[in-house]
Image: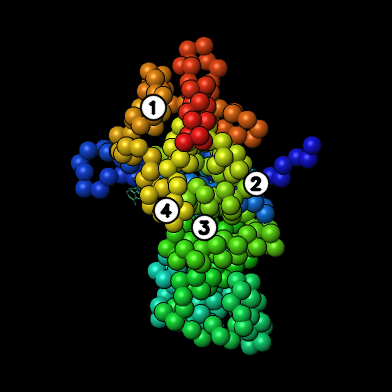
Amino acid sequence: MTRPESPVLQAVDLQKHFKLRGSRSRGVVHAVDDVDLELHRGRVLALVGESGSGKSTIARLLAQLMPATGGRILLHGEDATARGRTAFRRYVGRVQMIFQDPFGSLNPVHTVRYTLTRSIRIHRGRRRGAVLEEALDELLDRVQLTPSARYIDKFPHELSGGQRQRVAIARALAADPEVLLADEPISMLDVSIRLGILNLLQDLRDRLQLAILYITHDIASARYFADRTMVMYAGRIVESGDSESVTQDPKHPYTQLLVRSAPDPDDLEARAHGARGEAPSLVNPPSGCRFNPRCPFATELCRIEVPPLIPVGEGREAACWGYSDRPDRPELGSAVEAFARKGERE
Ligand SMILES: Nc1ncnc2c1ncn2[C@@H]1O[C@H](COP(=O)(O)OP(=O)(O)OP(=O)(O)O)[C@@H](O)[C@H]1O
């Protein structure tokens, strides 16, 4: 067996608690708790979950746009916490982020040439003349905006949403990064052009061997695009595994609800909110498994103790007591499996 390559970027026990503003109490929002994840060269990891589950917070922590409350971020196995501007700039050269709204993330008063030149100069040093033109040409070519002359002097408002997102990706590539953190990169785009952007990211994964974190509401797109998928619920990872297995044979009751409530490929919001009931408060999250108030199988143990991630197949884990072999476990696993099979038949 070949040894799996060591991760490029890794989060260990990551935690983010936001202090509640204006409250005199010591209330905090438990946005992210105990998250471990690994990003590998030439691989896409999808992070899936409904709105407010903490996905963007993880991306922002990994981009070091804000400090974590706990845990560590490792780049090639070494602590990557950037202390000071120089270290942060070096880190950003390795780890780049793409945002949901390409219109908001591109400055409307600057042309594509200005935006890309700035990024090239920040990350690669001063370039001018023919060398700069060649670099600009190459970046636009990588994101399939060709011929480059057609796009280089345009302002963001003169481009379509998809073209703007391609420029945002080109700006990230100007740093020659190893990691791309893509926070819902297609959710604001017209349905007809979403696939084109995912195909482009796939091409960059393969050609440049980028490690990509793909954040999405849309579990179906995770199956199409990501090698592995992690499902997040209320600040915790509840399931992970290869994308095909997680989406076709979900183990955690939350993933099962997410998959079953995704009938309409165009309606991402309906999918995101499809699971029955309300997402819990993250100020006072439910004790035990955070999904227990919505879970049809919850037992006393689920209400008391947080389930660990339990192996549920090759390279797969689910944080559900139903799969534990504790002597006091509720006989949940088989019920959960039966529920998944019932879902398939419906
Ligand atoms: N700066 C902040 N201050 C206080 N609470 C915050 C802050 N940023 C995020 N939160 C809270 O943390 C939780 C997780 O938010 P986050 O944006 O990471 O979720 P998400 O899964 O990315 O949702 P969406 O898909 O809607 O972006 C939410 O309850 C949110 O209200």
Q: Amino acid at mark 3?
A: Ala
Q: CA distance from mark 3 to mark 2?
A: 18 Å
| Residue 187 coordinates in the image, percent (x, y) | 44, 59
Q: Amino acid at mark 1?
A: Pro
Q: Does residue 207 appear left or right of residue 184 in this picture?
A: right
Q: CA distance from mark 1 to mark 2?
A: 36 Å
Q: Nearer the viewer, mark 3 or mark 2?
A: 3
Q: CA distance from mark 1 to mark 4?
A: 24 Å
- Mark 2 sits on what residue? 7
| Residue 19 coordinates in the image, percent (x, y) | 31, 44
Q: Residue at x 37, y 18 (%)?
A: 300
- Mark 4 sits on what residue? 268
Query: Relative to 346, does residue 102 appear above or below in the rendering?
Result: below
Q: Residue at x 44, y 51 (%)?
A: 264
Secondary structure, mark 4, is helix
- Mark 3 sits on what residue? 182
